[in-house]
Amino acid sequence: MTAISNDANWWKTASIYQIYPKSFCDSGSKGTGDIQGIISKLDYLKLLGADAIWLTPVYQSPMIDNGYDISDYYAINPDFGTMADFDQLLAQAHQRGIRIIMDIVVNHTSTEHHWFQSALGDKNSPYRDYYIWKDPVDGEAPNNWQSKFGGNAWELDEQTGQYYLHLFAKEQADLNWENPKVRGEVKEVISFWAEKGVDGFRLDVINLISKQQDFPNDEMGDGRRFYTDGPKVHEYLQEISEAVFQKYGSVTVGEMSSTTLEHCQQYSSLDNKELSMVFNFHHLKVDYPNGDKWTKAPFDFQQLKQIFNHWQTGLNGKGWGALFWCNHDQPRVVSRLGNDKEYRVESAKMLAASVHMMQGTPYIYQGEEIGMTNPGYDSIEQYRDVESTNMYDIMVNQQGVSHDEMMAILAQKSRDNSRTPMQWSDAPYAGFSKAQPWLGVANNYFEINACAAVEDTNSVFYFYQKLIQLRKEIDVITTGSYQDLYPEHQAVFGYQRQSDTQTLICLNNYYGEEAECVLPNGFDVGKAKYVLGNYDDLPQGVTQHQVLRPYETRVILAERVSE
Ligand code: TEU
């Protein structure tokens, strides 16, 4: 048995593995994953070296948004199993030294939640004020705020003539955090899971909880500036943190939609008054030209480097960030920024090293560790995601975008790209289930699967394993400052991490042709050594002049030896 360490800062050298249960492993033949399936794969996660699992929502839910629409915070969705299964998962993970982080969705609830069911149609319901209701303006929605999933963000309650706010699907009603009773309920929910022994929480879109209370029309945009990092968000987070997170010593990661560095410095400030760390998404908008996700576009490499530089230097010594490329809302990174054909293995490893050698806590999304790709769906019937199907309807049926154009956009941008079943083996349905899965498996599972990866010492899997180990062995990865070495370079993303005793350089060629760069003048190559690479024939000594092969990554360490 591996004991769970009691170091309060364990998460600063940890790597966290994200599980999307519906697509992870089906212990039976339902075609959807479940908790017993997760339990059966804990040894695999142990072999990888994961310190913790972030489990996306497994609560009772009508699954309009795959669990991000919670109808009961205290119950497990029977599709995933029972509370006893959950308790078993927690115990079995802890036995292996793996912690569990639960996903908490408290910006909104499902409209099937009993609070909303009572509030709907009844202005006198004790739960009416749990949600945000407004009268129509000139017979229309109260303002022009847009739902993140397309269309106006207000839905009419015909019986009372008032509208409720939903920043996501209309089945996800926003909670009214101004109401102290709502904040009380949130504390109770989180305490319930903390009492069970859960180690931490990932807080869904938590920087959207405080809305500007006059709910103005947005003449310049979709309304987000009136509720993103809103007026009382820090106050509310401090309140929850003091009442729950600090009491239980929970690690917390806030998902921050369209946030700023200044706010994130405060959300994750080192005095731990709000959250342990933050996810921001700016580096994943480099293929959204002019902020528009719904268009097919190459990524902007220079912008990517600038964004990392901004966040790495800006959080150092002030706050803490999550490091990641992939999650259940993002396309597969090897298809997005790498080359998922000729250089799939090389580019998957290079992309992994480029973020894992930064400061922060890395998150690995299921399948990323074996270099899973986008599935390349070519028919709209293959998509399940509410955002994708809504956007198809809006863009094709209402805005006149052609079907073919939209299919190309979805193949690049849809959230279903990452939600395809985990590829465990070359058995039917990739060994994910004995039955037809709820979402089609990518047809490359014969070659790309966990069994094959575990058997091949050169696989992407063992590269991730090594990255996880290096973070534990080399202090500068956690503590060092960050400097972008070649901000203008057209192909190389190279940065230096520096502490009093160590210098680490991470060089990454983001393209399919050879690229050259020169190590900084002050860097003593004589004292340096390669600690990691994605080609198996690294040159002997480190040289000042570096020639990187297609998608090559090299990690170089120099230590100051005391005389
Ligand atoms: O996502 C929040 C969010 O705003 C985005 O990731 C969003 O899904 C994407 O930008 C749309 O283009 C979180 C969850 O991770 C996501 O799965 C949920 O659908 C969403 O909140 C609502 O709970």
Image: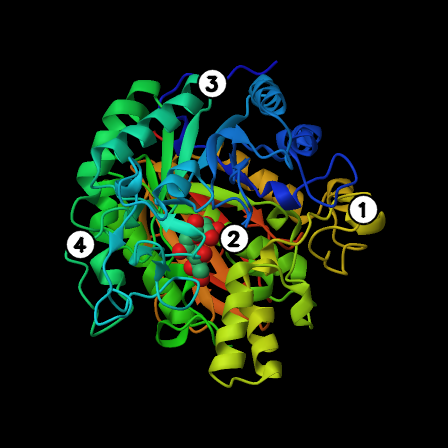
Location of residue 517 by image quarter: bottom left
Q: Quadrant of ligand 1?
A: bottom left
Residue bearing mark 4? 212
Q: Position of residue 448 (x, y in %)?
A: 74, 53
Residue bearing mark 2? 326
Residue 313 vs 149, above or below: the answer is: above
Q: Secondary structure at mark 2?
A: loop
Q: Secondary structure at mark 3?
A: loop
Q: Residue at x 60, y 67 (%)?
A: 550
Q: Position of residue 140 (x, y in %)?
A: 28, 70
Q: What's the amino acid at mark 1?
A: Ala
Reading the chain from its start, which is encountered first: label 4 or label 2?
4
Q: Residue at x 21, y 68 (%)?
A: 137
Residue 189 vs 344, above or below: the answer is: above
What is the CA distance from the residue labelled 4 to the residue labelled 2? 31 Å
Q: What's the amino acid at mark 4?
A: Gln
The reply to whether the C-beta atoms of the residues labelled 1 and 2 are less than 8 Å apart is no
Reading the chain from its start, which is encountered first: label 1 or label 4?
4
Q: Position of residue 348 (x, y in %)?
A: 60, 56
Residue 471 vs 406, above or below: the answer is: above
Looking at the image, is mark 2 or mark 3 nearer the viewer?
3
Residue 560 in sight from this viewpoint = no
Dot label at residue 435: 1
Dot label at residue 77: none
The reply to whether the C-beta atoms of the residues labelled 2 and 3 are less than 8 Å apart is no
